[in-house]
Amino acid sequence: ETVEFSKAVDKAIEWYKQYPNETLIIVTADHETGGMGVGAALYPYYTNIGLLANQQSSYVVCEQKITEKINTYGTQFTFDSCMTFLSGMYAIGQNNLQLQAYDSLRLQRAYNFVFSIDDKTNSDDARLLYNLSPSALYTSGNKAQAIVVTMNKILAEKSGIGWTTYAHTGVSVPVYAIGAGSEIFEGTYDNTDIPKKILSLLEITK
């Protein structure tokens, strides 16, 4: 989706180059998501963004595949089997993505939570640790997210990326503008001012 969006902007810019005095392009977002920061708690002054290339599929696809394995094999999908699967999905052991004992313990805890194996994780802890909704706490298949969330946290930490949430944040978003009247989109303002600025350029009033 990001690539397709970039292509759409490229097309708009091609049009702008033909008609620079009649075209205004504005690129922004309705909200920020994730609260991403460069520098994670375990590695505050270190980044290795290249590690992200180890992830072989999206979060959603990985969760779907683990859910399929859980629903098909149950507890026969052992922790070792799970680690083998994750090694393939995240190229663990390759390209400098190495798991430490602490990482393995967290993945073991997530696996135990999924199968309710000697696990003392209560519902409140689960929501904080694994971003699980209350309705997902009662079946192993629905709890597969715990494993993927844990693995993604590990990958993010080792890459030097920190996240504050799994959802929207109140962080300001950038507004990029080029073309006729783009200068009025400089500075900081409320999101509801954007349509007002556009209307002022069109000389439309209520």
Image: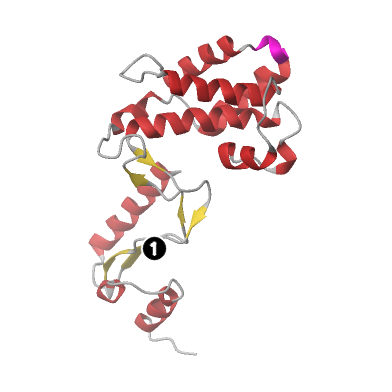
Residue drawn at x 35%, y 64% as measured from the top left = 26
**Is 81 positioned to the left or the right of 23 in the image?**
right
Magenta segment includes 74: yes
Residue drawn at x 55%, y 26% as measured from the top left = 62
Label 1 Cα crowd, 10 Å radius (few <14 / some 14-19 / many 20+): some
Q: Which residue is mark 1?
A: 172
Residue 146 falls in which quadrant of the image?
Answer: top right
Residue 174 falls in which quadrant of the image?
Answer: bottom left
Please tell me which residue lies in front, 13 or 161. Answer: 161
Q: What is the chief secondary structure element of the magenta stretch?
A: helix
Please tell me which residue lies in front, 68 or 114. Answer: 114
The three-letter amino acid code for the residue at tag 1 is Ser
Q: Residue furthest bottom?
A: 206
Q: Which residues are magenta?
A: 73-77
Compared with residue 69, is residue 76 higher up or lower down, i.e. above or below? above
Please tell me which residue lies in front, 22 or 187. Answer: 187
